[in-house]
Amino acid sequence: MPTVKASYEAVFVYSMTLGEDGIAAIKEKFQNLIAQNAELGEVDEWGKRRLAYLINDEEEGFYVLYNFVSGPEFPAELERVSKITDGVLRSMTIRKEN
């Protein structure tokens, strides 16, 4: 039976304490992870934004939106990796309606 694929978008908030090089590296890491496990679509860099509330005593985060198409098992793996990666303040992956 073929795997049913769906469209997803994942928003990541990276810590500003990483610095420019660190943010570029972590952004690349997740972009590569998605590209290896799914069809990577548009990557939309929202840049530095003020957080609605403090996360780990930080007021600002670097936002990146990744669009991708994958089977149902990959988004859970993406969330798992984001939770154990230093420098990721928050991430959220949602399935887009067609």
Image: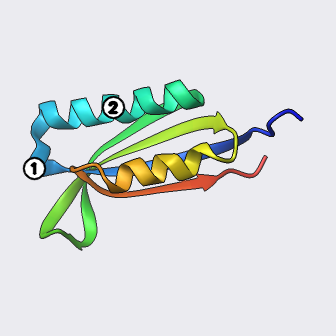
Mark 2–mark 1 Cα distance, whole angstroms, equals: 17 Å
Q: Residue furthest front?
A: 1
Number of numbered discs on residues: 2
- Secondary structure under the numbered disc 2 in the rendered image: helix
Q: Residue at x 27, y 36 (%)?
A: 26
Q: Between tags 2 and 1, which lies in front?
A: 2
Q: Would residue 49 appear left or right of 57 to someone viewing this image?
A: right
Residue wearing tag 1: 17
| Residue 9, percent from left and from top | 56, 46
- Secondary structure under the numbered disc 1 in the rendered image: helix
| Residue 15, percent from left and from top | 20, 52
Q: Are marks 2 and 1 in contact (CB under 8 Å)?
A: no
Label disc, if present, on residue 27 of the rendered structure: none
On-image quarter of the N terminus? top right
Within-10-Å neighbours for mark 2: few <14, some 14–19, many 20+: few
Q: Is residue 9 above or below residue 35?
A: below
Q: Would residue 71 appear left or right of 52 to someone viewing this image?
A: right
| Residue 72, percent from left and from top | 69, 47
Of the image marks 2 and 1, the number of the one nearer the N terminus: 1
Q: Residue at x 13, y 30 (%)?
A: 21
Residue wearing tag 2: 29
Q: Would residue 98 appear left or right of 23 to someone viewing this image?
A: right
Looking at the rendered structure, the kind of residue marked 2 is: Lys
Q: Residue furthest bottom?
A: 53
